[in-house]
Amino acid sequence: MRNSKNSISPESTLMDIRTPKRPDIHQRCRVLVGDMRNSNIESEEGKMEDLLEILRDLHPEVDFETCDTLIDDKILDSFDIVSIIAEINDCFDVTITAEKITPQNFNSAEALYALIQELEDEE
């Protein structure tokens, strides 16, 4: 007879450990093939949608397509900025350096997208 402690199989335990509590960022981001600087309009729209999804995950109540006062109106706080930087770094494979962390670059989705494009062009 089996002991109740041993009733869980090792496979199910490993499965539980490996299952992430939140979706992996790379599953959410589109896989863009080829040179990012030569991507077509569809890919550019897809990248903007990825950025909007990152922002909506933080604040679903905000209309990021029209809001241009995210910092000025204190919609985004410092924790949000750190989260956005990490997600952008992972999703778009760019590095946002300290000198790029300015209110102007984070005041709107459009400004953030312009920053991403600028960083992609630099690489």
Image (spheres, helix red, strand yellow):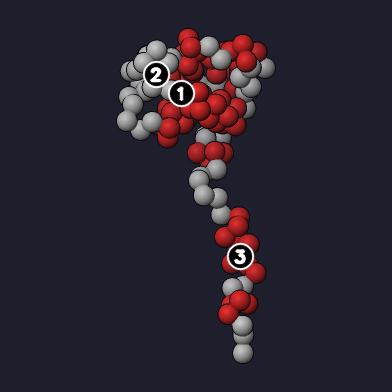
Give the residue drawn at x 52%, y 34%: 30
What's the CA distance linking mark 1 and mark 3? 38 Å
Q: Are marks 2 and 1 in contact (CB under 8 Å)?
A: yes
- Relative to residue 8, is residue 119 depicted above or below? above
Q: Residues within 10 Å of mark 3 (few under 14, many from 20)?
A: few
Of label 1 and label 3, which has the lower sequence position?
3
- Of the pair 12 and 43, the residue shown nearer to us: 12
Q: Amino acid type of disc 1?
A: Asp
Horizontally, residue 77 falls left or right of residue 99, namely left
| Residue 39 appears in view | yes
Q: Which mark is residue 74?
A: 2
- The residue tagged with tag 2: helix, strand or loop? loop
Give the residue drawn at x 61%, y 65%: 13
Q: Mark 1 points at which residue?
A: 77
- Relative to residue 55, is residue 103 depicted above or below? above
Q: Name the residue under label 3.
A: 13
What's the CA distance linking mark 2 and mark 1? 6 Å
Residue 108: x %, y % from top left: 42, 16
